[in-house]
Image (cartoon, helix red, strand yellow):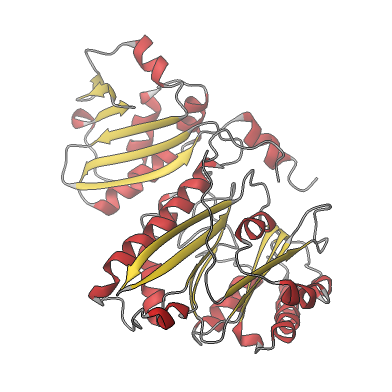
């Protein structure tokens, strides 16, 4: 965890309201870090439903495999998250660690191990000593209280420079329901399902299948449209929990995602995911620029996504932005290598609304001083017009600086 906060960190942090049916507590278990919290326990009331999406990596962590196996049961009573150790590529030892952790948590919360969900983040390949949770989780279960969202978000940080939280309140039926979320992630970010680690909680009374549908569709244009370095983690986990406590205030119980009463809730739910995803991009390791890549005029939305990701993941594009150089030649390169339909002579490129290239050549009105000035902004938008169709998409990324190399060169030191 860096001691210097990213210059792109949000200037306003929301007040995180209490969600009925959720209690939180954190502790320092000494997993890897010293002098800071590294374990989070979330305790949910009986009847809480759960949904999740996970990494598509062929080398998933032990906690990812644990959660996948338990998800179909649809219920959750506890979430245990640790930072400092990913419990990935740890073989039989890793599986034993998840079993022991879930057993300790289940005893502490008085539930079945099948109702315990796990997530770990940190170094890959190092065995996780789950015995460190013994005693800690029991204490946390007794200390857990509503509203400890900022402490929870800090406990799950690794190289993050600020805790990431988001909230929304919306009507469901005639009742007010709340959605709170937290996330961690700054490097090894190229989600292919969800994100590094993220957890969303609501008091809305949603069935597990409804929650799963909302989550699966919600990640596509939020977390799946963010990349820091093109590397998908072994541990990517996004879990959502619905306690159903708002039913006592008159919120209708929703059993299918297509229910028209969910329209406002769905919009708010996706807004929370989008907020968290942007905060991840703002906290990219060593980042000094938030970069939005917009591709329009593609043959399809899927084609636009692939081209946008090709640009966003290009080290040459990202280093040019770090150097405040509007090098559209590197953008042309990234568009061309994406393997998607593109016509050089129809291509137009703009930086922060200033067109620098048109119809396969430098724009006739190009002004180096004007473009250089806009590249000094903390947010850079690259707009790419292909002129081939109606497909459009956007992704978020950040620049690639010397600090990124320094952070990752020393990560295990």
**Count of numbered labels shown in the rendering:** 0
Q: Is residue 263 left or right of residue 195?
A: left
Placement of the C terminus among the 4 image quadrants: top right
User: Is 124 left or right of 350, judged from the image as shown?
Assistant: right
Instruction: Write the residue at 69% across / 39% down.
Output: 407
Find residue 328 and report its horizontal and vertical position in percent: 36, 25
Residue 40 in the image: state x and y as whole percent: 69, 66
Residue 186 visible, this orientation:
yes
Residue located at (57% from left, 82% from top): 45
Near-viewer residue (58 or 381): 381
Q: Residue at x 60, y 62 (%)?
A: 234
x then y, percent, for residue 74: 49, 84
In this view of the protein, which residue sits in the foreground, 153 or 132? 153
In the image, what residue occupies the spot 47% across and 21% down? 324
Residue 92 in view of the camera? no
Q: Nearer the viewer, residue 161 or 411?
A: 161
Q: Is residue 389 above or below residue 87?
A: above
- Residue 73, image x and y in percent? 51, 87
Taking 4 as reference, is 284 left or right? left
Q: Is residue 262 above or below residue 344?
A: below
Up the image or down, 120 lies above or below 314; here it is: below
Residue 209 position by quadrant: bottom left
């Amino acid at each position: 965890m860096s001691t210097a906060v990213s210059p792109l960190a949000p200037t306003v942090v929301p007040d995180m309201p209490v969600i009925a049916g959720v209690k939180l507590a954190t502790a320092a278990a000494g997993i890897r870090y010293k002098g800071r919290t590294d374990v989070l326990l979330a305790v949910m009331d009986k009847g809480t439903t759960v949904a999740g999406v996970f990494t598509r990596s062929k080398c998933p962590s032990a906690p990812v495999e644990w959660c996948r196996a338990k998800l179909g049961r649809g219920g959750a009573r506890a979430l245990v998250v640790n930072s400092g150790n990913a419990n990935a590529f740890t073989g039989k030892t890793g599986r034993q660690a998840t079993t022991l952790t879930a057993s300790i948590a289940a005893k502490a919360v008085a539930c079945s191990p099948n109702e315990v969900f796990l997530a770990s983040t940190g170094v890959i390949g190092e065995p996780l000593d789950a015995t460190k949770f013994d005693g800690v989780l029991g204490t946390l279960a007794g200390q857990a209280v509503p509203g400890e969202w900022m402490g929870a978000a800090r406990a799950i940080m690794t190289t993050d420079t600020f805790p990431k939280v988001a909230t929304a309140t919306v009507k469901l039926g005639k009742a007010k329901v709340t959605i709170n979320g937290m996330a961690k992630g700054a490097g090894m970010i190229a989600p292919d399902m969800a994100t590094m680690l993220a957890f969303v909680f609501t008091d809305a009374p949603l069935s597990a299948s409804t929650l799963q549908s909302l989550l699966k569709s919600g990640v596509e244009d939020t977390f799946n449209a963010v990349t820091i370095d093109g590397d998908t983690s072994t541990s990517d986990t996004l879990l959502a929990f619905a306690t159903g406590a708002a039913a006592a205030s008159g919120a209708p119980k929703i059993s299918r995602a297509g229910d028209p009463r969910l329209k406002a809730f769905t919009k708010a739910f996706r807004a929370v995911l989008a907020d968290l995803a942007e905060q991840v991009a703002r906290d990219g390791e060593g980042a000094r620029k938030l970069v939005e890549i917009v591709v329009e005029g593609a043959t399809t939305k899927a084609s636009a996504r692939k081209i946008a990701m090709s640009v966003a993941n290009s080290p040459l594009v990202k280093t040019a932005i770090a150097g405040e150089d509007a090098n559209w030649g590197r953008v042309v390169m990234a568009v061309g290598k994406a393997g998607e339909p593109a016509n050089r002579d129809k291509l137009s490129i703009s930086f922060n609304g200033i067109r620098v290239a048109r119809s396969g050549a430098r724009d006739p009105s190009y002004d180096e001083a004007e473009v250089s000035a806009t590249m000094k902004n903390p947010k850079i938008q690259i707009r790419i017009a292909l002129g081939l169709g109606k497909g459009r998409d956007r992704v978020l990324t950040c620049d690639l600086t010397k600090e990124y190399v320094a952070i990752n060169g020393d990560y295990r030191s």
